[in-house]
Amino acid sequence: MVHGEPGASMFCIVEGMVSLSLNRGHEFRRLGAGNVVGEMELLTGAPRTATVTALTDVHALEITKAALLELFARSPELIESFEAVLAIRQEMLEQISGNPTAASQRSFAGRAAQAFARLLGWEKRRG
């Protein structure tokens, strides 16, 4: 996964360790088994926010948009959990990039909610 590229799926790390870095190559986090990467892009439609590099052999499950929609349909309570993860990750990225603002966090929360509505087909229809 490369910073700035489009993303059509997310990955759940089953085994191994990855490094997350911004476009400048600065590592800001390491993730291992049980973590996911690529969720922001899949859910919001935005380009990849970080580059993910394997530090060890990695086994991961690819989760497509269709699979995620099915999961949300079966377990709607997961939507709030994903929204919380998105907000935390966005705040972390803003702090790392040196651009943390309350306004952008509020704006991101609104964008995340709208993205979920679009993803699930819950947008209000205008008549």
Image (cartoon, helix red, strand yellow):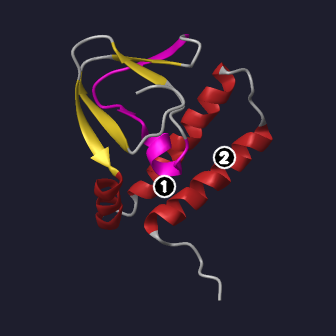
Instruction: Tell me which amino acid carries mark 1.
Output: Glu
**Percent position (x, y) of residue 78?**
39, 55
Circle 1 sits on which residue? 80
Circle 2 sits on which residue? 108
Instruction: Tell me which amino acid carries mark 2.
Output: Phe
Q: Which mark is residue 56?
A: none
Residue 35 versus residue 64 in the image, above or below: above
Disc 2 residue crowd, few under 14, some 14–19, many 20+, Cα 10 Å: some
Residue nearest the observer in this picture, 47 or 62: 47
Q: Is residue 51 left or right of residue 12?
A: right
Residue nearest the observer in this picture, 39 or 46: 46
Q: Residue furthest bottom?
A: 127
Q: Which quadrant would the N terminus be assigned to in this image?
A: top left
**Percent position (x, y) of residue 68?**
33, 54
For the residues labelled 2 and 1, say whether their Cβ atoms are less than 8 Å apart. Answer: no
**Percent position (x, y) of residue 45?**
52, 49
What is the count of numbered marks? 2
Q: Which residues are magenta?
A: 26-46
Residue at image coords 49%, 33%:
5
The label nearer to you, 2 versus 1, is 2
Say which element carries label 1. Answer: helix
Asked if the magenta segment contains residue 63, the reply would be: no
Residue nearest the observer in this picture, 101 or 38: 38
Residue 123 versus residue 44 in the image, above or below: below
Residue 113 versus residue 24 in the image, above or below: below
